[in-house]
Amino acid sequence: MSTTTTTMTAAAMPATSTSDLDLSVFSSSYVEARDKFLAATARLGLTVRSYLHPLEGRDGERLALDLVRVGREDASNLLVVSSGCHGIEGFCGSAVQIDLLRDAAFQRACDRDDLAVLYLHALNPHGFSWERRVTHENVDLNRNFRDFGRPWSEDLDYLAIAHLLLPERCPPTLGSSLGLTWKALTRGRKAIQAAISRGQQVDPKGLFFAGHGPTWSNLQLRAILREQAQRCRRIGWIDIHTGLGPMGVGERIYKGRTDAASIARARRWWGQDVTSSEEGNSSSSVLGGTLDQGVMQECPQAEYNGLTLEYGTLPGRAVLDALRRDHWLENHPETDDETRRDIKRALRAAFYVETDEWKRQVLTQARVVLAQTVVGLASPLDR
């Protein structure tokens, strides 16, 4: 690291042109993604800390949440880039992390005494390897950071449509699909989306299960935060996701404290098109137990500035149907191989668009967002 603290300006941001984009940062499997991530860190001479998962991957490989820190331990600003919170979405997030590690301009922009960068590769390595969105406990990790000392939610809205979401047959019958459509028409699409996706605690085998206790990934992340993030005064966190919104568009969804000043600061950092679920202008519903809640609990000393960078893939109904089929498959292990392959292909397509155009959109927008975050972390603290 340099010995000079630098004040970043927009003119000093890393280049964001697409002429140097290298699509080889994308991978076809968790194994390949992890190998590329480790190779990128090795080229920079960085130390990797691996938090080993208790289970094996799909191909018998070792699974890990891999951590790399660049910068001083006492840096007042911490930039975190995380991938694979929803396992299969790690294909996108891992590529962004590898691109940043290979980007000399970005590395130079982060070369400040007051700034450290933390890369968290594959928060949910089991889901990444097995190409599922959930953890090995069938838990949606981004609904799992909640107070488990409180009574479990009754989730009556979810129970009212559970029989339509996970029917006995696959593909889902016309009746169940029309039933969901009717619910959306009569109650409103946003209301049904919230009932499905906000995180339920009534069906451990169902969709968007929040869990009855902290998952392995939750516990590992909290341990990392206690070690890595309790000395800084400010955190800028980019958590990379896929599956919501228009194809290839990286929606900037604010995550953090919901007061007006915090949301205004997010728009100063990342632009006026930053959305907020609480304001109702995001493709995402208001969710419970999200990752940012865990970060703020573990790091109360720091000003928290979080962004979910959410890349669109297929239309929302196609994504939901892919998830419905995948959960049906998990609950029916006797399924024949051909049906299994079809279901897994559809799920992968719902969260990872394997075209050059989509990949270029991902990297281009990520570079802009990360450059803006570096600048934001050089601005005066609000408090």
Image: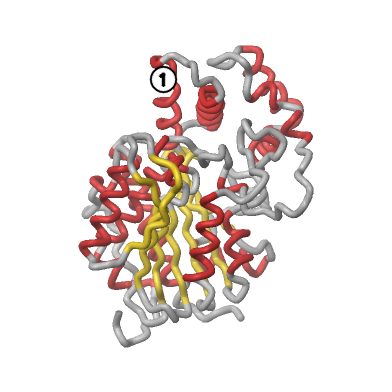
Give the camera-side residue of 115 and 7: 115
The quadrant in which the C terminus is found is bottom right
Residue at 47% from the left image edge and 80% from the top image edge: 76
Q: Picture quarter containing residue 113?
A: bottom left
Q: Position of residue 227 (x, y in %)?
A: 49, 70
Q: What color scheme is it?
A: secondary structure
Above or below, 72 against 43 in this view is below
Q: Amino acid at mark 1?
A: Asp
Q: Residue at x 44, y 77 (%)?
A: 378
Q: Is residue 293 above or below residue 197?
A: below
Q: Is residue 39 left or right of residue 256?
A: left
157 left or right of 172 in image: right
Residue bearing mark 1:
342
Q: Position of residue 35 (x, y in %)?
A: 27, 49
Is 257 on the left or on the right of 379, as rendered? Answer: right
Q: Residue furthest bottom?
A: 3
Residue 63 locus on image (x, y percent): 38, 46
Q: Residues within 10 Å of mark 1 (few under 14, many from 20)?
A: few
Q: Quadrant of residue 328?
A: top right
Which of these two is toward me, 101 or 51?
A: 51
Dot 1 lies on which element? Answer: helix
* Residue 373 visible in image: yes
Instruction: Look at the image and tell me in which quarter the N terminus lies.
Output: bottom left
Residue drawn at x 63%, y 18% as measured from the top left: 167
**At 65% across and 69% down in the image, what residue appears?**
261
Question: Which percent across, then down, holds residue 2?
Answer: 29, 83
Residue 317 makes an appearance in the image = no
Vertical side of 352 occupied by 241: above or below: below
* Residue closer to the observer: 206 or 332: 332
